[in-house]
């Protein structure tokens, strides 16, 4: 029954709740494309089975006096055919609704979820559970032995891993400078532009290896040069900063289905000539340094401190949200774009041949790119709040000049 269980939101969720808007809905979308068109009735049945494996999504976020909290709900999810904008607004304090939705279009299953509930890793786990149940129903007897998930307990899945692993009460200010942001007018307040780039993983990986860097560092360097080539000469002294979300489950023994990531920033100032290869190697060196366990813990301890300082705990929610909203706005000004590499997708091996590709988007007030790799399909989901698409064009042009074949799909923008 609804309301029997409840728990507090984690600190990352507090940021999303304070900064959600009609443009930046703080919604994360992940999709998988199957070999055959989706049967909506089977998908509905698969979703109802999937929420038994992940009841953590069957919740409502409620407002308390000091903090938000999360409680169970018996609202039934209903699958729909995709229609309207992607990354819809899935949270409203005055509306009793779920904070996720499942839709389909052609061969594609889409899961959209409010980022306060989970991160990309948690969303992909839930999407794969839905896909497994769907394929079991579509092909009875073919996938009965497929393991759906890790077998983590309910406590493991709902663990606030930030609280578990971090919090040494070290309050420090960062000295990062405001970053360059692509110029031009923004879209109307409730619109975003979505572009999906498809290319060969092996083609891009070969170029990265020839430079002696990872795929992330190579693509990060290409994005940096794409932004640089759009910069007016008078602004070249401003840093170009790419923020990269890091899955902390790779560093700490957590099986939580809630948020458990941290953002690290890679910065370069284009005050002198530099080749793409040199920039990619610099990017890789900085990334490696930032990803040391010592640096990750240091950054997270500062962030998690907010939860434990008595004066902060005693402040009413509306004041906390005002402060967090303004701090988040300042942080956004220190980032040129976000690049989230969700990595190589590994659905259960038994269903691997039924899936053609993965993709995804995240709403944002800045330029935002997700990266998904599945077999030889590399998919980038680019979200932009700008009318101007020059940076994306520069990025695509650079990869094409390096010998990469790319297909580009884009949503229509209402002007």
Image (tube, rainbow, N blue to C red):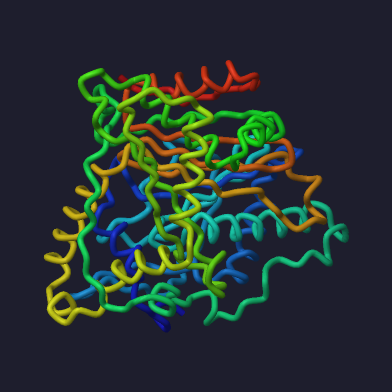
Q: Nearer the viewer, residue 69 or 358?
A: 358
Q: Nearer the viewer, residue 143 or 78?
A: 143
Q: Residue furthest right?
A: 141
**Residue at the image point whose x is 20% and y is 60% from the top:** 173
Q: Position of residue 18 (x, y in %)?
A: 24, 58
All told, the count of numbered labels is 0
**Residue at the image point whose x is 59% and y is 60% from the top:** 126
Q: Residue 88 is drawn in which quadrant?
A: top left
Q: Residue 198 is drawn in which quadrant?
A: top right
Q: Is residue 294 above or below residue 243?
A: below
Q: Quadrant of the C terminus?
A: top left
Q: Nearer the viewer, residue 1 or 127?
A: 127
Left or right of 352 on screen, residue 412:
left
Q: Residue 148 is drawn in which quadrant?
A: bottom right
Q: Position of residue 71 (x, y in %)?
A: 38, 75
Q: Position of residue 170 (x, y in %)?
A: 25, 73
Q: Position of residue 28 (x, y in %)?
A: 45, 49
Q: Nearer the viewer, residue 176 or 358?
A: 176
**Residue at the image point whose x is 81% and y is 45% from the top:** 353
Q: Is residue 129 above or below residue 233?
A: below
Left or right of 244 on screen, residue 213:
right
Q: Is residue 21 above or below residue 350?
A: above
């Amino acid at each position: 029954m609804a309301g029997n269980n409840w728990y507090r939101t984690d600190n990352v969720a507090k940021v999303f709740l304070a900064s959600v808007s009609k443009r930046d809905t703080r919604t994360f979308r992940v999709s998988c494309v199957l070999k055959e068109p989706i049967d909506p009735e089977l998908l509905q049945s698969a979703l109802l089975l999937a929420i038994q494996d992940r009841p953590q999504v069957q919740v409502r976020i409620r407002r308390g006096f000091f903090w938000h909290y999360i409680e169970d709900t018996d609202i039934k999810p209903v699958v729909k055919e995709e229609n309207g904008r992607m990354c819809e607004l899935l949270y409203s304090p005055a509306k009793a609704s779920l904070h996720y939705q499942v839709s389909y279009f052609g061969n594609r299953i889409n899961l959209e979820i409010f980022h306060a509930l989970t991160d990309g890793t948690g969303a992909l786990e839930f999407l794969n559970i839905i896909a497994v149940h769907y394929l079991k129903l579509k092909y009875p007897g073919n996938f009965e032995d497929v393991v759906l998930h890790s077998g983590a307990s309910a406590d493991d899945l709902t663990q606030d891993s930030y609280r578990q692993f971090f919090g040494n009460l070290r309050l420090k200010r960062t000295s990062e400078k405001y970053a360059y942001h692509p110029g031009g007018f923004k879209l109307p307040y409730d619109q975003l532009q979505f572009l999906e780039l498809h290319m060969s993983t092996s083609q891009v990986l070969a170029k990265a290896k020839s430079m002696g860097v990872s795929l992330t560092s190579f693509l990060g360097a290409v994005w940096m040069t794409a932004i640089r080539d759009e910069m007016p000469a008078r602004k070249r002294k401003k840093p170009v900063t790419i923020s990269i979300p890091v899955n902390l489950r790779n560093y700490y023994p957590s099986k939580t289905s809630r948020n458990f990531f941290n953002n690290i920033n890679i910065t370069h100032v284009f005050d002198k000539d530099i080749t793409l290869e040199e920039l990619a190697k610099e990017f890789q060196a900085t990334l490696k340094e930032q990803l040391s366990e010592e640096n990750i813990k240091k950054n997270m301890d500062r962030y998690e401190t907010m939860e434990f300082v008595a004066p902060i705990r005693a402040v009413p929610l509306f004041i906390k949200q005002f402060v967090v909203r303004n701090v988040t706005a300042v942080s956004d000004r220190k980032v040129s774009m976000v690049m989230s590499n969700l990595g190589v997708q590994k659905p259960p091996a038994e269903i691997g041949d039924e899936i053609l590709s993965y993709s995804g988007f995240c709403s944002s007030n800045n330029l935002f790119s997700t990266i998904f790799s599945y077999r030889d399909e590399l998919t980038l989901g680019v979200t932009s709040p700008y009318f101007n698409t020059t940076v994306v064009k520069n990025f695509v042009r650079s990869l094409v000049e390096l010998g990469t074949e790319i297909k580009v799909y884009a949503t229509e923008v209402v002007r």
